Image (cartoon, coloured by chain):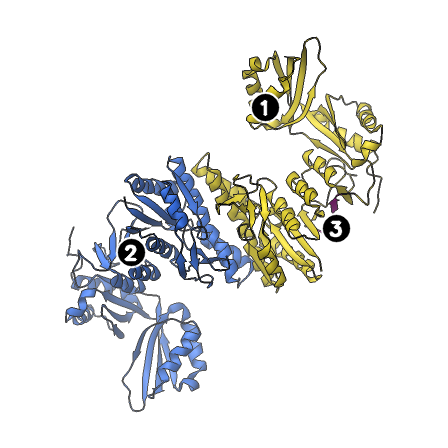
Chain colours: A blue, B yellow
């Protein structure tokens, strides 16, 4: 008998017929003799509707009250799912985040899990029930309801899998698994059988919207076996684990992100402490910086460039313009005509020439590279915004990702 | 400084602008130097929408899961109200039933309050905050969410007022207060300044839909000062308390109920235990009986008549027909062409002739009386269904209820 945690997103439970479908799927797993814990998100547009209700009252609602409001969405889903399983003749019980002892800090709307008291869940599982848990939500030490922020339900599922020492944590989404590239851009993209936590982390932060980073980090920390699979079909999905056992390929996938902008601070003085000043300023303003590049000094000045989320561009430019003297820089320039294209693979560190192959693919496609950033397991290039898809296709083709059929 | 509990129903918080209006009203009370605890129902049609969601999944959903589902409605209201008060610049915090320690038994969808742990509320009041509490909901000893059934939010408000030893519990509704008769039927009906708990109980159960009986019973038990007033205007409302101090009138009001039916069981044997058999049968089937009348025996048989809710008529008739032999009766007859008209007043016990006055008013209006039932503080008559309003008008006029203007 295995203990399996299954997470279903909002679109999988958007209406009554989808709830019934997911219920059948859950019961299938249960009837194989497994103990099953299910984590659900809010139905379809429920969260957006609740946010709209808050907006009608206040432009800047208290975060504590937003958590009070938004946590109702998942509570509705779990009650309906328990009813659906009952109707199909099987035992089930729904539990909220507070009820399962999902203890978090008090950072409302973006709380971190501190401890999971799985006793209630264990008791219900031992009583033979399918346990349906509200994702995304927890409780702080004051007894206040908190929410976990973006991707929170994935994080709930992984945290429960870790606390309950589950054999498997299945994340059901609207895609089949993790692909070598976005199939909408590269129709021949291939589904991966498995991928390491680190590769998944790079792919996630690079714009592949399959799993939220926090859930992958947590899975890595507690060595939880994750599977990403489709709620629409019975296909195998992709396993995320410490070591990729099946696929020893060098490059796992090509990702891209068009939601970025590039800022360059020109002619800052080439003395110690300048980078600290700049990035402390940005951090204090809550601006997340992705790639950072610093040019080699020319004379007594150098240029510092970095990328940020597109939505924060003007705010960031304003902030730096106001602080040009403090930073000791001459001017700022910026563009949103950029996209980031990346290749990810734990194998690349031991394979010289990977970067060259990628740059060659771009050159042959006549795509100019504006910035380059590398790590142990990824290489990212900035290209022109409207060339992102073409770049992904060229790279995917050059590395022969589609052809390596293992199935 | 007084401690005031204010309860607002679902229509008072149905949309953003009404929420803002109620927020202003709450702040008014707060600015007079009072501590304020607010109890809210779910917005407008929210509860009906949630029930519909459950119906789409299951015709007979688990009561525990219904409570899980429905309790989200009030939680949405309280979060929005706290945001509204914040936006107007005042401190407020929302709390769910479980968070305020509203402890109930485990009778899901119709739970009874067993204990109220007011510590969290007291702490927030002491910190200067307006406390917004979700009505209708509680928590049982397993940590499961329960709901209190019909009129549950009124009951929550009174229970909190009792537990916190509040100076006043204000129930805001869509009417100005308690009237001597339904103003739609008797345009000259007068609003009462005050009324006793017992009178209010009789009026409520007689079809005046102002306050739910359970809340009045609870108020009587803990001697909570209740005020019923409108959320639409600043009028004084009606005080419900142990003794009516202002109005010493004999008759407080005339009520009617058209939602009833009458059943008669003809020629049951006139021996001990027959009534027990009948009403045990009905009680076991969950059928609530109102008026019961037993004729004087004729020979060795007698007739037993009673009234029930109109919606349960056929079910009740079927049940009795199936059990005629067991009961030892000859036949059943029934009608839904009846309505109950009642007068209520604690003073009537000491005033002979009240019943005669009522019967005289009906006789002069040419209205036939089909059944009569009396208690210490009320007299009810069954009349023809389509004569109910005319009966109320005639009685209201005869007792001169409109003329006794005290204001």
Q: Is residue B305 left or right of residue A260?
A: right
Circles 2 and 1 in contact, beta carbons < 8 Å = no
For numbered disc 2, what is the local secondary structure?
loop
Specify the principal SS of the magenta part.
Answer: loop
Image: magenta residue range = B233-243
The residue lying at 30 percent from left, 78 percent from top is A293
Q: Quadrant of residue B209?
A: top right
Tell whether label 3 touches label 1 (CB within 8 Å). no
Disc 1 to disc 3, C-alpha distance: 46 Å
For mark 1, what is the residue?
B280
Does B85 appear in magenta? no
Image mark for residue B288: none
Mark 2 vs mark 1, foreground winner is 1
Q: Tag 1, which secondary structure?
A: helix
Q: Nearer the viewer, residue A101 or B50?
A: A101
Q: Nearer the viewer, residue A40 or B349?
A: B349
* Dot 3: chain letter: B
Residue A260 coordinates in the image, percent (x, y): 35, 69
Q: Quadrant of residue A292?
A: bottom left
Q: Chain of mark 1?
A: B
Please indicate whether residue B142 sits to the left or right of residue B83 in the image.
Answer: left
Residue bearing the label numbered 2: A224
Quarter that holds the N terminus of chain B: bottom right
**Hey, which residue is sitting farthest bottom in the picture?**
A299
Q: Is residue A113 visible?
A: yes
Please provide percent x and percent y for residue A29. 30, 42
């Amino acid at each position: 008998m295995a203990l399996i945690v299954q997470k279903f997103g909002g679109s999988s439970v958007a209406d009554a017929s989808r709830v019934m479908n997911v219920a059948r799927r859950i019961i299938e797993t249960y009837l194989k003799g497994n103990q099953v814990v299910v984590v659900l998100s809010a139905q379809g547009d429920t969260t957006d509707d609740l946010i709209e209700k808050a907006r009608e009252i206040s432009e800047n609602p208290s975060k504590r009250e937003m958590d009070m409001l938004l946590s109702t969405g998942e509570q509705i889903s779990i009650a309906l799912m328990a009813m659906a399983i009952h109707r199909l003749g099987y035992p089930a019980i729904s539990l909220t985040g507070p009820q399962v002892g999902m203890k978090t800090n008090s950072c409302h709307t973006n709380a971190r899990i501190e401890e999971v008291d799985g006793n209630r869940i264990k008791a219900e599982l031992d009583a033979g029930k399918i346990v349906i848990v509200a994702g995304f939500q927890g409780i702080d030490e004051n007894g206040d309801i908190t929410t976990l922020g973006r991707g929170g339900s994935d994080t709930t599922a992984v945290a429960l899998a870790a606390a309950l020492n589950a054999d498997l944590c299945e994340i059901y989404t609207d895609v089949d698994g993790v692909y070598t590239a976005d199939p909408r851009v590269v129709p021949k993209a291939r589904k991966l059988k498995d991928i390491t936590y680190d590769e998944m982390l790079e792919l996630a932060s690079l714009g592949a919207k399959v799993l939220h980073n926090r859930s992958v980090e947590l899975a890595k920390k507690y060595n939880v076996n994750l599977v990403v699979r489709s709620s629409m079909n019975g296909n195998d999905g992709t396993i995320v684990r410490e070591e990729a056992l099946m696929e020893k390929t060098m490059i796992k996938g090509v990702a891209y992100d068009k939601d970025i902008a590039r800022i360059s601070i020109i002619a800052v003085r080439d003395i110690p402490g300048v980078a600290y000043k700049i990035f402390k300023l940005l951090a204090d303003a809550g601006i997340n910086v992705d790639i950072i590049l610093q040019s080699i000094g020319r004379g007594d000045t150098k240029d510092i460039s970095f990328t940020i989320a597109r939505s924060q561009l003007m705010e960031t430019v304003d902030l730096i313009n106001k602080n040009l003297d403090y930073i000791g820089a001459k001017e700022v320039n910026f563009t949103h005509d950029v996209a980031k294209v990346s290749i990810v693979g734990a194998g690349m560190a031991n394979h010289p020439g990977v970067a060259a192959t990628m740059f060659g693919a771009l050159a042959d496609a006549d795509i100019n590279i504006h910035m380059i950033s590398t790590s142990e397991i990824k290489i990212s290039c900035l290209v022109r915004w409207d060339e992102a898809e073409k770049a992904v296709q060229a790279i995917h083709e050059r590395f022969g990702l589609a052809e390596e059929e293992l199935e």
